[in-house]
Amino acid sequence: MANYFALARKIITGKTAQKFMTSTVKSASAFPTTIEKAAVKMKPTAIENINKITRLGNRKSTELYNYLPKEAQKNFENLLSAGKRLGYVKTDVSGNILSGSLERFLSVFDKNSYSKMLYLEQNFKNLEKADFKKLLNIYKTPEKMAANKKNIIRWLEQNEKLKNIAKALENEGKNLAENAKKDILDTIGIEPQCRSKGFESIYDKISKEVLKGKEVNDIASARNVVRDLVGTRLILDDVSPGAMQKITDNICKGIENGKINPYRISNYANASKRYLSDAQFEQIQKAAAKKGIEIPRIESDQISVSGYVSAQMNFIHSNGVAGELQIRGKLMHKYAEIEHIPYDIRMGKNIGKNIPELEKYFEPIEDAVTSLKRNGLDKIYDKYILDCYKYIRKYEQGKIVGKFKLPQFPKKLYDYKILSFESLDKIHVKANKIKGAYELLEKAA
């Protein structure tokens, strides 16, 4: 029961409870009488003062739990259930909670996250792990969850239907990907990397729309949501102004001959670092305008806050599929792929892809990312990421010469070195091997 109390202590708050438990440790003989008097005053309030309550031994924990107000016991059981559902709280063959797993669960989330877990457990039973995590990340507070309860219910009712739509759209993307890849090769003269969007990504996108109150009833409405069904990337060795001008000229020719029909360009980063200059941007706009296509000027700050640099274009391919083209340098590409691990965790994406070995491998990274926020260190980490991207872009531009060496990981984040670019690079390589092996097994089956 000691493990139970470790969780219960997050639910019982207040000076009376703290004082009571401290005095109980000093005077074990007074335990039964003291607890009866103090239990009445304990309130099952928000989860606060987490580390201020003294831990008791097994016998005392059991007795304390029995004297908790019923509402506190219910909150405790719901929170424990959430920990199990998320895969944090684990048990042995006899059903006893493993202390290490419970300590992990208690150490990584903030108060607001635990409150959201309680809301979901109280209102939506039997959620799958991925769906539980999705709701935790989409809604910022339990109040937002409550305000969108009808949308959550509708989403759960339509879940199987949405998954079928996502699967159908995934298959459509696979069938159209090669033609889309050929469009880019024929237009720009450089063979791009190409991938069709996977089931999980499609399902996430359409789920978010439904949870916002929008309708996604069939594959046609899903296409309107998933505007990057096929993604192509130009990973360039040469990102000089001259090389980018040649690419710009070829994009304009592709617009003129109908190979690509752009409707949006996002030039991530500030003016001194963009891959596309203002003049090149306007050149593409004018080529599209001649075909009756208006492209709004979007200098997006959504991603550029991190320092990440990319020229991104959304268009309709000649075969009608919605596509997205990303243009970036080889160095920027390498580190953007690596940094996507913590980025996706922050966005609540299912980075484990339901592969058990991969989920276990990513556990410490997920813990570190969540703990950063809980301990108020996320802004220091954001600054580190920004400095790294600045360095990478300057190196690409030739403003830094000599041996490539990223900025040093902050000393204040010593306990989070697993999130350094150097560590994430090794993790990224191993994760790709795990995914590759899994894909081979799937094909063989």
Image (tube, grey):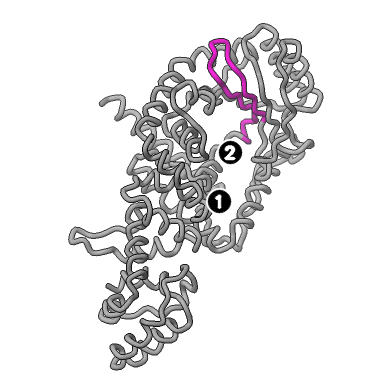
Residue 312's quadrant in the figure?
top right
| Magenta highlight on residue 320 | yes
Residue at the image point whose x is 47% and y is 68% from the top: 46
Q: Is residue 256 left or right of residue 67?
A: right
Quarter of the image with the C terminus in it: top left
Type of amino acid at the residue the image marks with label 2: Ala
Instruction: Residue 420: give its label.
Output: 1
Q: Is residue 123 left or right of residue 242?
A: left
Instruction: Residue 68: give its label.
Output: none
> Which residue is situated farthest in the top direction here?
257
Residue at the image point whose x is 66% and y is 53% from the top: 383
Instruction: Residue 336: give its label.
Output: 2
| Depth check, front residue: 95 or 236 | 95
Type of amino acid at the residue the image marks with label 1: Ser
Q: Is residue 127 left or right of residue 140?
A: left
| Residue 242 can be seen in this image | yes
Q: Position of residue 102 (x, y in %)?
A: 35, 63
Q: Secondary structure at mark 2?
A: helix
Residue at the image point whose x is 30% and y is 74% from the top: 2
Q: Which range is magenta?
A: 311-332
> Which residue is situated farthest in the right direction here?
279
| Depth check, front residue: 167 or 195 | 167
Which secondary structure type mostly characterizes the magenta part of the structure?
Answer: strand
Looking at the image, is mark 2 or mark 1 earlier in the sequence?
2
Q: Position of residue 66 (x, y in %)?
A: 27, 76
Residue 20's quadrant in the figure?
bottom left
State whether residue 143 is above or below residue 187.
Answer: below
| Magenta highlight on residue 137 | no
Q: Position of residue 200 (x, y in %)?
A: 42, 34
> Which residue is situated farthest in the left direction here?
94
| Depth check, front residue: 7 or 160 | 160
Q: Nearer the viewer, mark 2 or mark 1?
A: 2
